[in-house]
Amino acid sequence: MEKVGKIKKEMLFAGHLDEIDDLKKYGRDAPLIENEKNRNDLEKIVDAIVSRIEKADKGAVLLISSSKIRAIETAHLVGGELKRRLGEKIKIRYSSDEGLRAPDQGELILPEDYTSGSFFEGLKIASSIFYEESLNPSNKNLHYKFGDPLLQENGEFKYPLLSKCFKSSGETYAESLSRILKLVEKMAQKVGKLDSSTEVVLVAHGFTYQILRGLSVLAEQIKNGEVTLKTGDIPSRLSEIYEKRTGELRDSMCVPLDITNLGDKELLDVLEKEINFLDNKNTN
C-alpha cells in the first residue's frame, strides 16, 4: 500500500508596511507613514487573509507581530480592516513576539545636516559589510556586530568609516539567527494546540521571512533524506537558499509559509544543537 504523505500545513506571513523615514527622531523603529503605497499594500494583505479564511471557513485570526512599532501597527491595521470587512463573522486576536524582529542595527551617528527622509549612506555601507562578514559563506564571521568598525591588533579599524557612523554596534547574525531558531522551537510546541478554526498570520520583516522560509526548505530536505546537517551548517545552508530567493513577499505582501515539517523531531534536534553553537561566542 502506498504511504500517505503528511498533510501540508501553512501559516501566512505578512510584511510590515513602510514606516516614517526619520532616523533622527525615531532611529530604526518608527511608526507607519500614511501614503497610497501603504494603503495598497494593506489591501493586498487583507485580501490574502480573507481569501484563506473564506476557503477554510475559519472564524478567527491570530496576528503575531514582531516587537517593532512598524510591525505592531501593521498588525492592528490589518485586524481593523478584517473586522470592517467581515464584522461579527471574525474574531481578531493580537500578539507580539521579540523573536520575529529584524536584527538590531545599533545607534547611529547622523550628519549635522541630516533631515527627515535623507539618505544615510552609513546604513547602506554597514549592511553591505554585515553581509560580507556574516552571510557570505567564504567568511562566516557569525559574531560580527552590525556597524562594528572592527578594531584590529595593529590598533587600526578594518572599516574606519563605520567608526564615524555608529555610536554603538548592533546585533550579530548569530544572535539574530539564534533568536529566530528559538522562536521556531516555541512555534512547534504551540501551533498544534491552536484551534483549527484560527488563521495564524505572522507580521514581521523580510529578514525574518527569509530565515523562516529557508528553515522550511531545510526541514523538507532533512525529512526527505536529501541533506544531513552537522552542527554549524545552518547559517551557510540558509545563505545558499537566500541567494536563490525571489521577491514574492515584496510583491504580494502576504504569502503562505510552509510549516509542515518545522515541528519534526529531526529538525528540532538539529535546531537545539545549532542554538547552542550560535550562543557560544567561540564558534568562529
Image: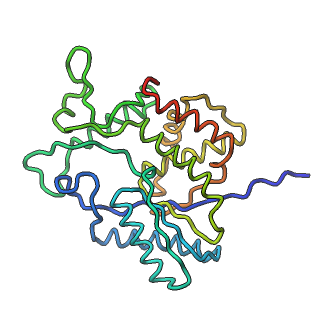
> Could you tell me which residue is drawn at 43 percent across and 73 percent down?
43
> Could you tell me which residue is drawn at 62 percent across and 64 percent down?
194
Compared with 126, 263 (above or below) is below
Pick the quarter of the image with the C terminus: top left
Instruction: Classify residue 77 as left or right of residue 217.
Output: left
Q: Position of residue 42 (x, y in %)?
A: 40, 71
Instruction: Classify residue 193 as left or right of residue 183.
Output: right
Instruction: Classify residue 92 as left or right of residue 146.
Output: right
Q: Position of residue 146 (x, y in %)?
A: 31, 37
The foreground one among 61 and 35 is 61
Q: Quadrant of residue 173?
A: top left
Residue at the extreme right: 1
Q: Quadrant of residue 138?
A: top left
Q: Position of residue 110 (x, y in %)?
A: 15, 45
Compared with 138, 30 (above or below) is below
> Could you tell me which residue is drawn at 78 percent across and 53 percent down?
5
Q: Quadrant of residue 39?
A: bottom left
The foreground one among 115 and 189 is 189
Q: How is the image coloured?
A: rainbow
Q: How many numbered marks are there?
A: 0
Residue at the extreme left: 112
Q: Position of residue 103 (x, y in %)?
A: 37, 45
Residue at the extreme top: 154
